[in-house]
Image (cartoon, rainbow, N blue to C red):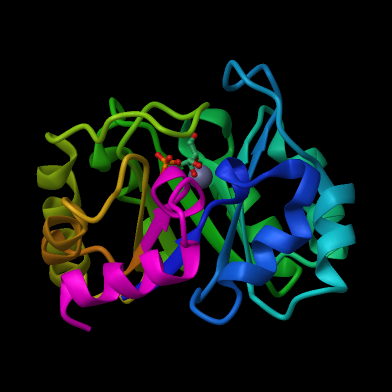
Amino acid sequence: MKIAPSILSADFANLLQDVKEIEEDADLLHIDVMDGHFVPNITIGSVVVKALRQYTSLPFDVHLMIENPDLYIEDFVKAGADIITVHQEACVHLHRTIQRIKGHEVKAGVALNPATPLETLKYILEYVDLVLVMTVNPGFGGQKFIDSMLKKIKELDEMRKEMNLSFEIEVDGGINIKNIKQVVEAGADIIVAGSAIFESPDPSSTIKEFREAVGT
Ligand code: DX5
Ligand code: ZN
């Protein structure tokens, strides 16, 4: 299991300090980009990603919650993204968008909102490096995990086996020490957590506790 702390719940006035606190324990840094159109919140853009890039070697897992992601892929690649994930719901020509990301030699992911069925990914799964299953409606940190998404994660894991594919399953939203084990048992490879890590008194110990809870 990989852990990807989401900086959405970090202290933006002390962003680098918060990143440094989790750097040794995290596997990836999850960066939530929101445009105020695809989701009802605005966060950060490629300039912040670029600024952080020079201070950490953690892989950058960029989650684009934006309309027209094709227009910004190159900016995020240049800023230092290692993985770029776009939403199925934001891409009319998803195959083209995924190819565009992979053309830059970064990993390509596709994200699904809670209400979007897995079947919409049937013809794209063979081209992606990861699938991000949203377990809250995107836009904000600190929301409650939607329990019915456990079934969705399991079904995606089954589809992966049946299709003999090796994309990673990333799960994002409402994950904490109480539910992390269930999420991993359902089939998740990468766990995103924002508030549970950065709003805890000791983010680095919280990541260690997450690993203990899962037994890895
Ligand atoms: C929500 C974001 C998440 C968010 C998760 O739209 O995509 O990455 O930061 O935050 P928590 O872990 O607090 O639900
Ligand atoms: Zn996210």
Q: In this view, does 46 lie to the left or right of 33?
A: right
Name the residue at 39% across, 48% down: 196
Q: Is the magenta stretch mostly helix, strand or loop?
A: helix
The number of discs equals 0
Residue 209, quarter of the rendered image: bottom left
Q: In which quarter of the image is residue 147?
A: top left
Q: Where is residue 160 in the image (x, y as percent from the top left)?
A: 22, 66
| Residue 100 percent coordinates (x, y) | 70, 57
Residue 79, horizontal then vertical, whole percent: 85, 61
**Place of residue 205 in the rendered image (x, y in percent of width and height, measured from the top left):** 40, 70
View extreme (front): residue: 201
Identify whether 80 is placed above or below 35: below
Residue 169, compared with residue 47, is above or below; it is below
Residue range highlighted in magenta: 191-216
Q: Which residue is drawn at 67% across and 27% down?
A: 67
Quarter of the image with the C terminus in it:
bottom left
Left or right: where 57 falls relative to 117: right
Taking depth in this image into account, of 106 and 33 the one nearest to the observer is 33
Q: Is residue 155 left or right of residue 24?
A: left
Position of the N terminus, as image quadrant, is bottom left
Which of the two residues, 86 or 3, is positioned nearer the viewer here? 3
Where, by quadrant of the figure, is residue 213 drawn? bottom left
Which of the two residues, 158 or 60, is positioned nearer the viewer here? 60
Q: Tell me if I can see residue 138 in this picture.
A: yes
Residue at 74% over, 53% down = 15
- Residue 82 appears in the rendering: no
Question: Does residue 198 show up magenta in the picture?
Answer: yes
